[in-house]
Image (cartoon, rainbow, N blue to C red):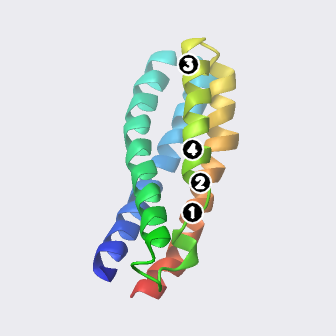
Amino acid sequence: MKDLVREGAQNLETSLGEIVPALLRVSSDYRLGRGQAANSGFGQCLEALRSVIELVAKFREVSASGAFPDLPVTLTFAGHDQRLLGLLNEMSTAQQGRDWIFLADLIEYELVPILKEIAGGLPEALRALA
């Protein structure tokens, strides 16, 4: 079980390391009026975000089950999955309304900080799982 949790944490770390810079590029593209590039990049980022949300939810389930009592607290991500889901809904509304600047703001000032917060706890968790 510990190996599976460690592998999941490593996958999450890799995903976050790729998605954060991609999201910042998307935000910049929206601000610069490059809608086609931004929409394409945003679609790819949404797919990656779904995987991140699924991994975060799985870590919370493992933590809540008590099956792995030594799970580092940094892997419980209390509330992060709900925050991400709410933000995705808000971003979808902004995209449907073609409010590109608001969408860029949500990505850069709301989404990226949440993802960085999640990523910030992973090194400690990986050390604890080693």
Given the image, on which type of amino acid does mark 4 rest? Answer: Leu
Given the image, on which type of amino acid does mark 2 rest? Answer: His
Q: CA distance from mark 2 to mark 4?
A: 6 Å
Residue 39 in view, yes or no = yes
> Alpha-carbon neighbours of circle 2 within 10 Å: few (<14), some, or many (≥20)?
some
- Residue 48 shown left or right of residue 107 in the figure: left
| Residue 29 spot, x, y in % from top left | 55, 27
Instruction: Say what secondary structure mark 2 lies in.
Output: helix
> Alpha-carbon neighbours of circle 3 within 10 Å: few (<14), some, or many (≥20)?
some
- Would you name the residue on which mark 3 appears? 95
Instruction: Say what secondary structure mark 1 lies in.
Output: loop
- Would you name the residue on which mark 1 appears? 77
Q: CA distance from mark 2 to mark 3?
A: 22 Å
| Residue 22 spot, x, y in % from top left | 47, 42
| Corner quadrant of residue 58 | bottom left
At x 40%, y 51%, the residue is 54
Given the image, on which type of amino acid does mark 3 rest? Answer: Gln
Would you say the residues marked 2 and 4 are in contact, meaning their CB atoms lie under 8 Å apart? yes
Q: Quadrant of the C terminus?
A: bottom left
Would you say the residues marked 2 and 3 are in contact, meaning their CB atoms lie under 8 Å apart? no
- Would you name the residue on which mark 4 appears? 84
Q: CA distance from mark 3 to mark 4?
A: 16 Å
| Residue 16 spot, x, y in % from top left | 46, 55
At x 65%, y 51%, the residue is 113
> Alpha-carbon neighbours of circle 4 within 10 Å: few (<14), some, or many (≥20)?
many
Frontmost of labels 3 and 4 is 4
Would you say the residues marked 1 and 2 are in contact, meaning their CB atoms lie under 8 Å apart? yes
